[in-house]
Amino acid sequence: MPIKPNRLQKGDTVGVIAPASPPNPENLKKSLLFLEELGLKVKIGQHVERLNGYLAGSDEERLQDVHDMFLDREIKAIFCACGGYGTGRIAAGIDFNIIKENPKIFWGYSDITFLHNAINQQTGLVTFHGPMLSSDIGKEDADPLTKQLFSQLFVPGDFTYTEDISPLTSIISGKARGQLAGGNLTLLCSTLGTRYEVDVKGKILLIEDINEEPRNVDRMLNQLLMSGKLREAAGIAVGDFNQCEPEREQSLTLDEVIDHYIALANVPAIKGFKIGHCSPNVSVPLGAYAVIDADEKKLAIESGVL
């Protein structure tokens, strides 16, 4: 059974870390005001402002911030400042016993997918695929729904994604139940052949990505197919593929690529979820049980907190 972290309460202290790339300082400041408006106190990781090329400090520094925040009894949730690159570099150094003994809300997406996958596998902890503080919440045009869905951290309750949020398309009909797993397609493929290879057997696989031409998406979905992952899934939820249009005139469309591989997987599947590098960016708990109903075009997800 998945381990759910405790819900947040007003007055709680939450931590902010940058386990991948460095955040935009101004956007981060604005996002911290949002957390304070939620009634939370904020503690910044020791190395969040460090710069090391496209990384927010050295691997050792970013790893230390992960450990420190999980060990800090005062911290009730950990929010990632931004994605980018680099979480796969620190995964092997994580002491997962620290996380298992100190379960708490862990939130982020994109490059954070590698950590979601590793944490879910090694500890069973439900983590949250949600918008980044710097690159999403700190922007002037942050969508109200993106912000509103932070409420799921305070009040346990099931969430159902329907066409009230965005148009959805059923690709393969049917209904399936399983834990929600996945995230960024590029990062999921990067786990294959490693100790943290994504496990989707009997689960609802979520995929999303950004800045990948259809030919790149084709390559990655083919890799998931040949590794057995697509057919092992109980169902597939296709999130947002932002700026994934072809750059060349002769190309398959993104829909043609996705529909081809979903047909080969032949499991209940829906596309059109505003989950990923998009606005609104709908946050969901990975590891929580979900039901995908392609006939009714909805995804029902159990609460991610206690």
Image (tube, grey):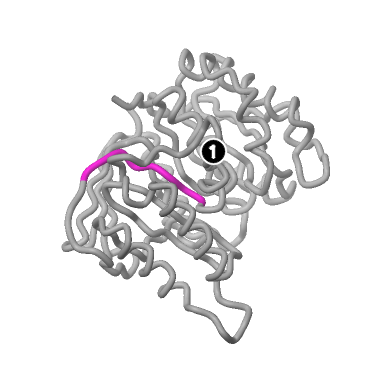
Give coordinates of residue 257: x percent, y percent: 44, 70
Observer-nearest residue: 43 or 231? 231
Q: Which residues are magenta?
A: 177-184
Look at the picture and state if 33 lies above or below 218.
Answer: above
> Residue farthest to the front?
226
Question: Which residue is pictured at 56% across the width and 52% down the height?
Answer: 186
Image quarter in which the N terminus is found: top left
Observer-nearest residue: 189 or 33? 189
- What number of labels is visible? 1
Q: Amino acid at mark 1?
A: Gly
Look at the picture and state if 194 lies above or below 85.
Answer: above
Question: Which residue is pictured at 42% across the width and 59% down the height?
Answer: 239
39 horizontally vs 176: left or right: right
Give coordinates of residue 56: x percent, y percent: 75, 39
Give coordinates of residue 146: x percent, y percent: 46, 54
- Residue with the mark numbered 1: 193
Question: Which residue is pictured at 54% across the width and 80% down the height?
Answer: 251
Q: Quadrant of residue 125?
A: top left
Observer-nearest residue: 149 or 115? 115
**Residue 205 drawn in magenta:** no
295 horizontally vs 135: left or right: left
* Main SS category, magenta section: strand
Observer-nearest residue: 261 or 286? 261
Look at the picture and state if 88 lies above or below 212.
Answer: above
**Residue 179 drawn in magenta:** yes
Q: Quadrant of residue 263?
A: bottom left
